[in-house]
Image: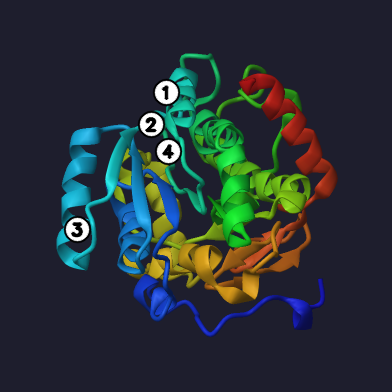
């Protein structure tokens, strides 16, 4: 894509979530943020609540979520967010959340993420990073589709945000061995595959749901020190430290990391536009699949935006989750 045609906003890598929502009025809008008990998730939920949205924290640990909800209410002066249980690696938990939702949904932020240091599997036998980061969010989004469409009919649009990562540049989605039954397991490759999948989900969901008024975009929050890193192996930690030392990225605060998510949620420049990958509060430029992260730390690989690959992944994901 010609760089001149890429979507830009007034915000950049230094912008915060509060910068993005300043002057935005979300009263009367419903938002769900997964993984909203800490890190980027709680910051995203706080900013949406500050703008007036009615926010639901979808979390595995409702007690920790309750603490986050109380904090959000205290610092924003808004109503306390609702807290509902959601385990993205458990299909029954996802189904319970979706069937229990009964109002139009304007914003769904698929923020929750998991990193493992070794091979773990979900109760369905799926590789756990893909199960949580992609398949769980895929099933949740499909389960909430009717409510997103209802919000779009009432308010003109509904938006879904899928969190991806620069890690997507490490690996495409391997449909022939999604769950590492044949290839050697590498947790970094598995995580990368899950984040490529998040971007491909945005591509195909936007295509399928455009007529419903629902747009879906993928975002890269950048390097942020959160609880996500607690399960990193020593090799993963060394890889990150080396990338930072080489100037490939600079760590952001959680407030800065959440800014690109908030751009995808509220920026007028993205009204009616989906299937994009955002980085540093703007649309990223596309790079070849053989490009390196060192060369293009703010790019998105072709394999993460490939329409055919997105359709194939959607088909396989639907077969697994429905």
Residue 35 image offset from top left, x and y in percent:
37, 43
Give the number of the mark in front: 1 or 3: 3
Kindly identify the residue that appears in the image at 74 percent across and 65 percent down: 286
Q: Mark 1 sits on what residue?
A: 93
Which quadrant of the figure contains the C terminus? top right
Q: CA distance from mark 1 to mark 4?
A: 17 Å
Query: Relative to residue 238, is residue 27 depicted above or below?
Result: below
Q: CA distance from mark 2 to mark 3?
A: 21 Å
Kindly identify the residue that appears in the image at 70 percent across and 45 percent down: 205
Kindly identify the residue that appears in the image at 38 percent across and 71 percent down: 17
Q: CA distance from mark 2 to mark 4?
A: 14 Å
Along the viewing direction, whichever of 236 and 206 lies nearer the viewer: 206
Query: Relative to residue 133, is residue 264 depicted above or below?
Result: below
Q: CA distance from mark 1 to mark 2?
A: 6 Å
Secondary structure state at the residue bearing disc 3: helix
Q: Mark 4 sits on what residue?
A: 114
Say if residue 253 shows up in the picture. no
Secondary structure state at the residue bearing disc 2: loop
Labels 2 and 4: the sequence-earlier one: 2
Residue 73's tag is 3
Give the number of the mark in front: 2 or 3: 3
Q: Are there few (<14), some (14-19), or many (20+) residues within 10 Å of tag 4?
A: many
Labels 2 and 3: the sequence-earlier one: 3
Q: Are there few (<14), some (14-19), or many (20+) residues within 10 Å of tag 1?
A: some
Secondary structure state at the residue bearing disc 4: loop
Q: Mark 2 sits on what residue?
A: 86
Along the viewing direction, whichever of 222 and 38 lies nearer the viewer: 38
């Amino acid at each position: 894509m010609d760089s001149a045609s890429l979507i830009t906003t007034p915000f950049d890598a230094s912008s915060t979530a509060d910068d993005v929502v300043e002057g935005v009025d979300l009263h009367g809008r419903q938002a769900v943020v997964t993984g909203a008990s800490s890190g980027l998730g709680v910051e995203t939920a706080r900013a949406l609540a500050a703008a007036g949205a009615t926010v639901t924290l979808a979390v595995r640990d409702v007690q920790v979520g309750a603490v986050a909800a109380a904090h959000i209410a205290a610092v924003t002066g808004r109503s306390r967010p609702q807290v509902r249980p959601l385990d993205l690696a458990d299909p029954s938990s996802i189904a319970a959340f979706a069937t229990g939702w009964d109002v139009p949904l304007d914003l769904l932020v698929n923020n929750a993420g998991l990193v493992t240091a070794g091979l773990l599997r979900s109760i369905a036998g799926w590789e756990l990073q893909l199960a949580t980061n992609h398949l769980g969010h895929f099933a949740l989004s499909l389960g909430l589709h009717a409510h997103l469409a209802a919000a779009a009919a009432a308010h003109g649009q509904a938006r879904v945000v899928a969190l991806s990562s620069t890690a997507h540049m490490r690996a495409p989605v391997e449909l022939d061995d999604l769950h590492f039954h044949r290839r050697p397991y590498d947790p970094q490759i598995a995580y990368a595959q899950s984040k490529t999948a998040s971007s491909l989900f945005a591509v195909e969901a936007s295509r399928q749901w455009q007529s419903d008024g629902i747009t879906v975009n993928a975002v890269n929050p950048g390097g942020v020190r959160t609880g996500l890193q607690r399960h990193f192996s020593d090799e993963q930690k060394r890889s990150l430290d080396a990338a930072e030392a080489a100037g490939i990225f600079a760590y952001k605060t959680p407030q800065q990391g959440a800014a690109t998510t908030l751009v995808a949620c509220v920026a007028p420049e993205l009204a009616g536009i989906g299937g994009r990958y955002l980085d540093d509060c703007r649309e990223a430029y596309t790079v070849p699949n053989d490009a390196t992260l060192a060369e293009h730390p703010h790019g998105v690989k072709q394999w993460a935006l490939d329409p055919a690959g997105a359709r194939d992944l959607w088909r396989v994901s639907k077969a697994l989750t429905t």
